[in-house]
Image: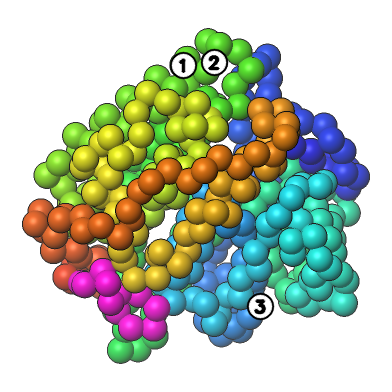
Amino acid sequence: MGMLVEGRWTEQDTTVEAGAFVRRLSVHRKALGAEVVDAIVSDPGRFHLIASLSCPWSHRTTILRTLKGLADAVPLQIAGGRRVEGYPANGGRPWRVPGTEMRIIHLHELYRLSDPGYSGRASVPVLWDRRDRRVVSNESAAIMRVFDAVPRPRRSLDFTLVPEPLRGEIDALNATLHEGLSDAVYRAGLAQRQDAYDSAVAQVFATLDALERRLVENRYLFGAIITETDWRLFPTLVRFDAVYHSHFRCTRRRLVDYPTLWAYARDLYAWRGIAETVDLAAIRAGYYQNDGVHNPFGIVAAAPDADWMAPHGRDALAPAQVALCGGETRTVDPRRFGGRGG
């Protein structure tokens, strides 16, 4: 995968140890404070989000940017294409770094600009501060939380996806789903040892089975109220049949083989603006074309047949609700929700 070591690009790969995939912690992972929230409101365009259409961790942040109506306040730069020295910053074309006159090709150049002696992976998503010319965060969880904390304009629903009464449960379930599914699919797909693969794939399907049971009577993971955890889960579900089932060898069952979970995923897909954050062609290309070890010829598998627009029927369980920042809840129509309105 490659990484920077003291500011120099190297093809060194530290993500596999003794045949097992090990996810490294983001270097810029600390929680983002109120000063970042205030700056997003008072100085639109100061912070830029650099994300990949194929990366599920990026996808979480673009979903929050969409739901919170932050398109004007936080410009988006898509990092994608064939990875040579990691992610291209602009599909292999020069990109001018906001706040500078510097043009870069590779995302790792942005990290080096922020910290000339940086050591670590040049991963996405990135929240870039054009004023201070530095990487503020490359941790999706921190970026999601700071986007969620941005207050909504007047006459819009000022909602939160992390309501205080549920915060502890949300954090706990986030951790469970990360270990058992979002990271486990990678541990299965990138394993170089049979027992590492077997252990990871068992976790994947144990977690999917538990989610199927949990969602039989609950519209969302915490009942009728949509939360951050639903939107952390969705990027993994939307990629499951397209790449994880096939390319990452999570072949025991497909998402469409879980009637409840498949309907739940389509329910999330139907929220206003969410379909526009999903590019299945870019997702398949991002995985298949950039995994030379498992797919040396870069052949992109055909897309599975799946109708994401089919009626999901989840409305019968409960009307969709959001938690307001003032503590109340509000019933919403997902098809009209988000952006500037609410």
**Which residue sits at x=82%, y=32%?**
12
The answer to whether 239 appears left or right of 294 in the picture is left
Nearest to the observer: residue 252 or residue 101: 252
Residue 55 makes an appearance in the image:
no
Which kind of residue does numbered mark 1 sit on? Ser
**Callout 1–callout 3 Cβ contact below 8 Å:** no
Height in image: 299 above or below 40? above
From the top left corner, tell me how far across and down residue 283 is, in percent.
55, 50
Instruction: Provide the residue span drawn in magenta.
Output: 332-342
Q: Residues within 10 Å of mark 2 (few under 14, many from 20)?
A: some
Task: Check the picture and name the quadrant holding the N terminus.
Answer: top right
Amino acid type assigned to the residue bearing label 3 in the image: Arg
Q: Position of residue 165 (x, y in %)?
A: 25, 54
The residue carrying mark 2 is: 196
Mark 1 Cα-neighbour bin, 10 Å: few <14, some 14–19, many ≥20: few
- Residue 46 numbered mark, or none: 3
Q: Which mark is residue 199?
A: 1
> Residue 321 in the image: x percent, y percent?
20, 65
Hey, what amino acid is under mark 2?
A: Ala
Image quarter (top left, top right, bottom left or bottom right) of the C terminus:
bottom left
* Number of numbered discs on residues: 3
